[in-house]
Amino acid sequence: MPTKAEAPDPLDPGLVRQAVVLMIGGLASLLNTTIVGVALDGARTALDAGTEQIQWVATAHLLTLAVVVPTMPWALSRVGARVLWRAGLLVFAVASLLCGAAWSVSGLIAFRVLQGIGGGLILPLLQTILATMAGPRRLGRAMALVAVPGQLAPLLGPLLGGVLIDGPGWRWVFWVSVPLSVAALILSWRGLPDSVPTDPRPLDLPGLLLLCPGLAALLYGGTQLTASANGLGGAWPPIALGTALLSGYARRALRRRHPLVDLRLFRDRAFALSCGLMLLAGASIFGPMLLLPLFYQQVRGATGVETGLLLAPLALGTMAALPLAGRLTDRFGPRPLLITGTVVAAASTLPYMIAPATGDPALSIALFLRGAGLGLATVPITTAAYMRMSPEQIPAATTLLSVVQRIGGAFGTALLLAVVARHLDGGGSALQAYAIAFGCTLVLSLIALAPAALLPRREPTPADTSALTEFPRR
């Protein structure tokens, strides 16, 4: 039997080509997510909209993603991976064109909903397709490839957004994703394996009516934790409604043979722990992604373009760590690398808590180390989630991972913004407010060490040697 230290199976050129095709589509979707924020003020002025109206451009997109993602396993069983991938890209490209051409704020919101339908399919499909094609022995390196668009987008988004806003205008912030979407669509004709669904699942309509609105209500409540004018009072009703609907879905799903998303996957210890880690990662990664630009702009006085450049070490550190993370995870399993990456990411937060005594070069080094730590930590989380899943279980596993990550991101962001706002409202300085908020991210990162230490060791079995190169045709 192979040992954990044995060299894993190599990535064949066919898998790498397929990964590149998928990453182009993933970059189009993620670039849109990171760049659109800079277009909102210009769109508000051009479309003569109020601040609350224009915020729905972002909120409607977020809620649409929550509704679309759970339908992916069912749609995949009906039409296959390649058809669904093309449909998602086509809808996303058309919606991006329409967003840039919007003539009113209501039209822009409607087109952002359409964009969310396409984008909500692209990212879960990317992860599902690569995890299925890679097989257990190459899973860590496949997840490292999945993470590449997520690291390029935060680096390119703010810089490109600033250039477009200062140049041709806010509409081009939406149009810039179109060439990437079209390129990914064209390449998918030859660059992706076909799949023939022979076991289509019936649509669990009652489950759909419980799960999707429940997720949307829960995420909307998370956004209202800081946005609501009357404090927590405006957030609790949607949170309570979402919790009730999701509880109803859980009771139904555990009794059905083909639920919309199979919650029985949580019986697997590695997957359940990975989802808990993904929830914490959503809070401790996406929250600081919003805090860091605000810190540099409000505390350090940086412009938009300067902020993008100052944040570049974060993405560079992650990009440098991803190849190493994939190889080491495949060789030694996820647990040791996850613990190491979490400790490095947590320690690199300390300079931001003592910012008055820390110069920009030291903060840049800390940011590079944080990016490296995140790169080392995020790959093992997804690898651990998939390592005991059969190909048929991977779509549902991807959906659950995406859902808990979005919930963690929404509530983590709300928590950190609430900490900053509360301190500023109490008369504290911006520097102190951000130091406390970064301290919260440090605590969240350290909490993640407990489930990380409980992850089972990866013991390869003979079945691990049969890596899949395409979706099963059953």
Image (cartoon, helix red, strand yellow):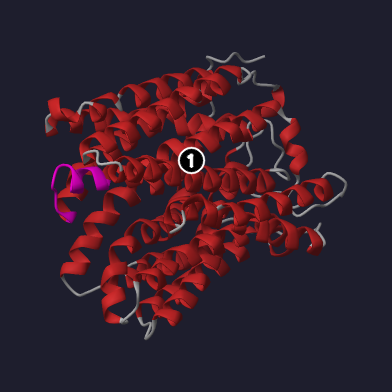
The quarter of the rendered structure image containing the N terminus is top right
Query: How far from the left and from the top, in percent, is residue 26?
Result: 45, 55
Q: Who's the residue at 34% across and 63% down the image? A: 36
Taking the image as shown, residue 75 lies to the left or right of residue 171, namely right
Membership of 295 in magenta stretch? yes
Taking the spot 82% from the left edge, 46% from the top edge, the residue there is: 251
Q: Secondary structure at mark 1?
A: helix
Q: Picture coordinates of residue 51 (x, y %)? A: 34, 70
- All told, the count of numbered labels is 1
Q: Is residue 277 magenta?
A: no
**In this view, 271 is above or below 446:** below
Residue 171 seen in the current view: no
Residue at the bottom extreme of this rendering = 103
Say which residue appears at 72% left-offset and 30% top-offset.
Answer: 268
* Residue that mark 1 sits on: 282
Q: Amino acid at mark 1?
A: Gly
The residue lying toward the viewer, choosing from 409 and 314, is 409
- In this rendered view, identify the residue nearer to me: 231 or 21: 231
Q: Which residues are magenta?
A: 293-304
